[in-house]
Image (cartoon, coloured by chain):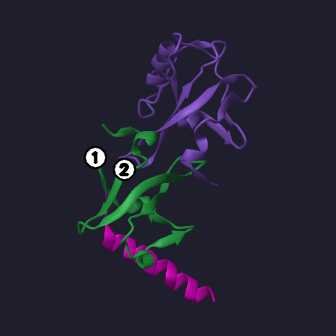
Chain colours: A purple, B green
Amino acid sequence: MELELSSLYGQDLYTDRGIYVGKIEDVSVDIKEKRISGLAVRNVNPNAFEVSKDKGVIIPYRWVTAIGDVVLIKHVKRRRADVVAKEEEGEGEGGEKAVEI
Amino acid sequence: MMKMSSLMLSNKKVVDTEGGEVGVLHDIVADAGTGILTELVVKPAAELDTSKFKTDDGYLFIPFDTVTAIKDIIVVDIKQIREHVRAATAQKSVAF
């Protein structure tokens, strides 16, 4: 399915277990790899990610499981963005991580 | 810096490898499953001859493969674009 990046702006992001994550503000693209690298999310639900007030997170695009009227990502246990980052580094998949922005 | 904000990319000027102005970037199309970027959606410059491009609804659709640089402006390979359009036209004439 083809997708215009601008159609993602402002979409609500949930986990596949129905937990609200936040609102997509921007899409990060990797120019060299020619693919979407992550979703920049604002208005982050503190029950999904523990981030400082007024901060957002970048969700790695490979966490995305569905794009429809809303966007779903695979469920992650509530954890701090930097903890996620550390765990993700271990997986070695191009350094993708949920980083606080 | 290889990761860029797509919001920052929109309205960037798009030029071809022969120095011609193509237009400004309007949107990017990607495959939802893989996240692979497939096409640039470009608002054509007023004086551009759009017959050499794939167009839809007044916008140019340029294969992402033809992008040679993205910095302050976006550079696309005009020869590759012509080849893509020629290939697409050839396919159409086979189908009919």
Are the residues at dot 1 and dot 2 in contact (C-beta closer than 8 Å)? yes
Which SS does the magenta portion mostly show?
helix
Residue A47 sits above or below residue A70 on the image: above
For the record, the magenta segment spans B75-96
Residue ID at (32%, 70%): B78
Q: Chain of mark 2?
A: B
What residue does disc 1 label?
A: B72
Q: Which kind of residue does numbered mark 2 sit on?
A: Lys
Q: CA distance from mark 1 to mark 2?
A: 7 Å
The answer to whether residue A73 shows anywhere in this view is no
* Residue B57 image position (x, y, % from top left): 57, 67
In this rendering, does residue B28 appear at all? yes
Say which quadrant the C terminus of chain B sits in: bottom right
Which quadrant: the N terminus of chain B?
top left
Image position, residue A44 (x, y; %) = 60, 19
The tag on residue B12 is: 2
- Residue A79 horizontal side relative to residue B84, left or right: right
Position of residue A16 in the picture relative to residue B79 (left or right) = right
The residue under the point 23% across, 69% down is: B18
At label 1, counting other C-alpha atoms closer than 10 Å, the crowd grade (few under 14, some 14-19, many 20 or more) is few
Number of numbered discs on residues: 2
Magenta span includes A87: no
